[in-house]
Amino acid sequence: MSMAVLAVVSVFCLCVTSVAGQSYRPYILLSSPYSAVSPGETVRIMCGGIYDRQYKDVCLYRNGSSIMRQYSYYSSSVTFTRFIVDVSDTGSYTCGPCSGFYKSRSISITVVVLQKPSLSLETSREVPWGQSAQMRCSISTQHQGGTFTLQQPNGSFTETVEDTGTSANFTIPQVDFTHEGAFDCQYQTRVSRRNFTSPQSDTISLSVIVVLVQPNISLSAPDGGLFWGPQGPEVTRGHSLSLICSTEPQHQGGSFHLIFDGSNSTRTQLAINHSASFYIPEADYSHQGNYSCVYEVTVSSRTFKSRQTAPLTVIVRASLAPIIASGVISGLFLLLLIPVILYLVKKKMNTVAQSSANRYGFHNGAGETHEEVENIYSYGVLEED
């Protein structure tokens, strides 16, 4: 009988000890909504299940070391309010009586600190209109697998790229003047069901420029009065000529300015199919000099001008028509003058022959003609009567 009573008492004692042991094991609860926090935030941790009145002081432990102590005031629970300073507050938290052996299970608190990312231009800060621009946003963090956002603080441009690493590349395929100005970037990641956003990076500025290629200038003579001399093209005076300005097809429209240094004048014509022709109906010496072209175009209400072409020297030479006409007239005059000269020479010879015949007493005998006497004189033959 005594043995049975002893057994029952032993079992009862074990049960009481076990129940008492369970009552002394505290529990821990995170009163804040998230276990991932940022520096500067406050978290509340409740430690409950403190039933033994001999344990009046309750401690909060981080990674096994006591960091806070609070008096229970005969309550079964206490609440710790912890101000998060930096990443050193990351760790495993438990609680329990400061002088007891029992501690609660652990909870984890992660302090997420995102540094300011850096933004760099992979291309030049001055990007030609219509070409591409590349930028790179990077951050140093352990919380990878987030999203990068490139934006204009004073504009409407925004682009987001998801990346598993710590950097992302952004490409603007064709820049225009809406992309001109400052850019910055941000990084966003998700830790323990909570989103964290980094500060904005320092801004970088992008300038959009319009680079016009140097145009070309050429010369043509529609009616064929163009010759190439040792100093360049030569146009016959009185013939027509055309000075042609052209450029590569970069932009639609625009105009060409023809600059003539001979009179410090400029002529302007609209570009048609990226060229313009300046016509001079009759070339004169006043058109002789250096010509050059400048291309001008308006892009998004901004006007741009190209570099001036190298000068084209035009020489106007005298026409050959008066010389040819003078030669023809001279030739005709000579043709008309030859018979007259022959007639005068012949007449002169007849006069000389007649004078010689009279001097030497020659006369026309019976049956002798004047021509015979003349022949006698000419050939120096005297015939006997």
Image: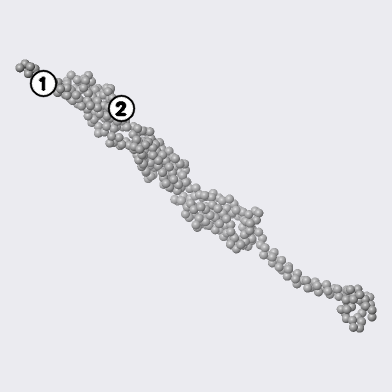
Q: Is residue 329 left or right of residue 144?
A: right
Q: Is residue 9 left or right of residue 56?
A: left
Q: Residue 12, percent across and down?
A: 10, 21
Give the quarter of the figure containing the C terminus: bottom right
Q: Earlier in the sequence, mark 1 or mark 2?
A: 1
Q: Judge by depth and name the residue closer to the eye, 155 or 133.
A: 133
Question: Where is residue 196, by image quadrant?
Answer: top left
Question: Where is residue 116, by image quadrant?
Answer: top left
**Amino acid residing under circle 2:** Asp
Asked if disc 1 and disc 2 are in contact, CB closer than 8 Å, the reply is no
Q: Is residue 200 visible?
A: no
Q: Is residue 272 left or right of residue 6?
A: right
**Amino acid residing under circle 1:** Phe
- In front of the other: label 1 or label 2? 1
| Residue of label 1 | 12
C-alpha gap between disc 1 and disc 2: 45 Å
Q: Residue 147, percent across and down?
A: 34, 39
In the picture shown, does residue 381 fall above or below 83?
below
Q: Residue furthest bottom?
A: 366
| Residue of label 2 | 89
Q: Residue 383, percent across and down?
A: 93, 78
Residue at image position (63%, 62%) is 238
Give the quarter of the figure containing the N terminus: top left
Residue at image position (92%, 79%) is 363
Q: Is residue 177 left or right of residue 76?
A: right
Q: Judge by depth and name the residue closer to the eye, 120 or 24.
A: 24
